[in-house]
Image (cartoon, rainbow, N blue to C red):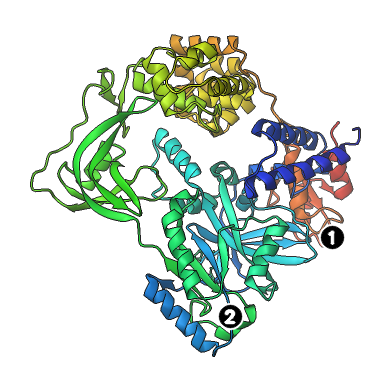
Amino acid sequence: MHDPATEVEKLREELRRHEHLYYVLDQPEITDAEYDALMRRLQVLEAEHPELGAADSPTQRVGGKPREGFTKVHHTSQMLSLDNALNEAEVRDFDRRVRDLLGGEPFRYVTELKMDGLSMAAHYRGGQFVQAVTRGDGLVGEEVTENARTIRSLPLRVKTEIESFEVRGETVMNRRAFERLNAEREERGLSRFANPRNAAAGSLRVLEPQITASRRLDYYTYFLFTGGRAAFDSHWQSLEELSRMGFKVNPHRTIASGVEEVLAFCAEWESRREELPYEIDGVVIKVDSVEQQRLLGYTAKAPRWAIAYKYPARQAVTTVDGIDVQVGRTGALTPVAHLKPVEVGGVTVSRATLHNEDEIERLGLEIGDQVVIERSGDVIPRVVRVHAQGSYRKRFRMPSACPVCGGTVVREEGEAASRCINTNCSARLKESILHFASRGVMNIDGVGDALVDQLVDRGMVESVADLYSLTLEKLMTLERMGKKSAGNILRNIGKSKQNPLPRVLSALGIRFVGERTAVFLAETFGSLDVIAGAGIEDLQGAEEVGPKVAESVFQFFREPRNRELVERLRAEGLQFTYLSTRPKGGPLKGLTFVLTGTLPHLSREEAARRIEAAGGKVSGSVSKKTHYVVAGADPGSKIVKAQELGIPVLDEDLLLDLLRPE
Ligand code: IVH
């Protein structure tokens, strides 16, 4: 294919289809690596042909430049909240009121899961995503367009006849992303998010879209509006239309013809909520007919046609019988409370994480105390507070020797964690292998806890590199390992050699080098050998790499064991080089532009995006540092200032000339 414009459009179409299959329908047709390859091809073409750039291209989800603050935006109509029903009786009360107010007219309810996130409105014009606004106080929210653009399940372009519409829905973080984020934060010495909702809110409301991009948020829609009102007469129909348009709509919903069916749905999901990959905190019950919704009307803050049935908080009180210590990949010792078994939201809980010594101190917890525990997002519950001190109490002390290998335990200045410093510790090795194989890192399916335990305990694997020397015969000596699964595991291990350098880098388990930092390092240096040979100062040349990270990377490659590991992985054929896809430099590198007035073809945003894609900077005001002012119709005072300072003024044509790659 020789015409880049055609290829770009084709790639975009294809990527959009795969995004929808993967992020909305959860039915991918291609592997992550194949998807990445398509994305990279598109990135390369767009970098080579900045004139083909488009705000709704799938490449634009990576996260643009940071901003200084959020703009407040008025909602088209108030984003209301809901009244709560805390038990069955309150749902029946709600149903009675609805029936009374509708005076015996037949009606139906739509029941949906109440996802625990934060609500957001997204606006579309001509089928293109143009703006996203958080709920805020319901009347005025914050504009988070660039951040929302990074959410893969939010389509940037949809096929529809409706010229202008708005969707409303819930931004959530699924449990896996939440756990991963917290693990990464802990590793970097940052505080954990208490639950996925806080994590979602903290990820959407950040000034750097790249941070949002790395957090893997999800967006489920539940309203479709045109001109500030429901687009269809039936709420159910709106949901179906949203789904048809390519939005993610929670599939677990029903249309119910009476309160009994509603209650059955509530009960069903109360017991099944653990099956869901995200947190829910109840069920939302809505009258289906928009006409009847209008008849029922609103109280000051909530509609009379809907209610939230809230599940009870998943907390319980129990006794701490003891505190154990677990050893992680970096040698960090995590205290874990042993609890008198107790049921919390349908699951029997006997352990809760205590994170570190400081946390135990903060809680004022001793062994023997009664505590309130809570399950939210984390696989393993947490201790919220001490409920009552035990009559017999015992203080916890961090052991001075590693409970697994007996190695020395050290707590460094300014660190929350105590660590086993024996690099041969088998607990550390097991965790390192699990990290190496995990999703988002080397992504080796089938290498889980049970397998790793056996591999390490039998001495078959003493380093992650040994995974690549496993054979069918060796694997088949393991318990419950048939030829077929052994074959699959070997194939998955083999496939992992194709993972690009950033994954290899994060697989090495260098402290403070998560997925994101690994990408920046790979982008900047292009090969593992350059990174391994770089000095502390050079390393800081990569985005987001400060002295702490640079020091950690530097030290990692000074360690003979690690160098040996690297050599073994090289011999196995892992990817040690990386072809950067981001425009480096570009024709406008080092030049600052100011835009003013209306350009004939490009919107202000589009012009700015193209200047930035070509390596230039866009600034809001004219100063001595400005290189060019680009002026369109009705330019305003900036042009006067430019003339005063003798700064060249360009029109759109001249700008496009500059943008053309030499
Ligand atoms: S409808 C006027 N539907 O719950 C109707 N809300 O307690 C307002 N939520 O602010 C919202 N899942 O953040 C609706 N399927 C769903 C929902 C849902 C979660 C959240 C939303 C809302 C809050 C109300």
Measured Cα–Cα span from mark 1 to mark 2: 55 Å
Residue at mark 1: C-beta within 8 A of ligand 1: no
Neighbour tally class for label 2: few under 14, some 14-19, many 20 plus, Cα within 10 Å: some
Disc 1 secondary structure class: loop
Q: Nearer the viewer, residue 506 or 305?
A: 305
Q: Is residue 539 above or below residue 620?
A: above
Q: Nearer the viewer, residue 270 or 206?
A: 270
Q: Quadrant of residue 596?
A: bottom right
Residue 531: image x %, image y %?
A: 57, 19
Q: Quick one: quadrant of the C terminus?
A: top right
- Give the quadrant of the N terminus: top right
The residue drawn where x is 68% and y is 76% is 233
Is residue 650 left or right of 329 when viewed as pictured? right
Q: Amino acid at mark 2?
A: Phe
Q: Secondary structure at mark 2?
A: loop
Measured from the top left, where is residue 133 in percent x and y?
60, 61
* Number of numbered markers: 2
In this figure, which residue is indicated by the disc labeled 2?
107
Q: Amino acid at mark 1?
A: Ala
Q: Nearer the viewer, residue 326 or 25?
A: 25
Image depth: mark 1 or mark 2 in front = 2
Residue 480 quadrant? top left
Q: Residue at x 49, y 88 (%)?
A: 100
Can residue 541 be seen in this snapshot? no
* Residue 638 visible within the image: yes
User: In the figure, 168 relative to 589: above or below?
Assistant: below
At 65% from the left and 50% from the top, the residue drawn is 149
State yes or no: Cβ of the residue under disc 2 lies below 8 Å from any atom of ligand 1.
no
Residue 131 rendering spot, x and y as whole percentages: 67, 59
Q: Which mark is residue 633?
A: 1
Quick one: which residue is furthest to the left in this view? 391
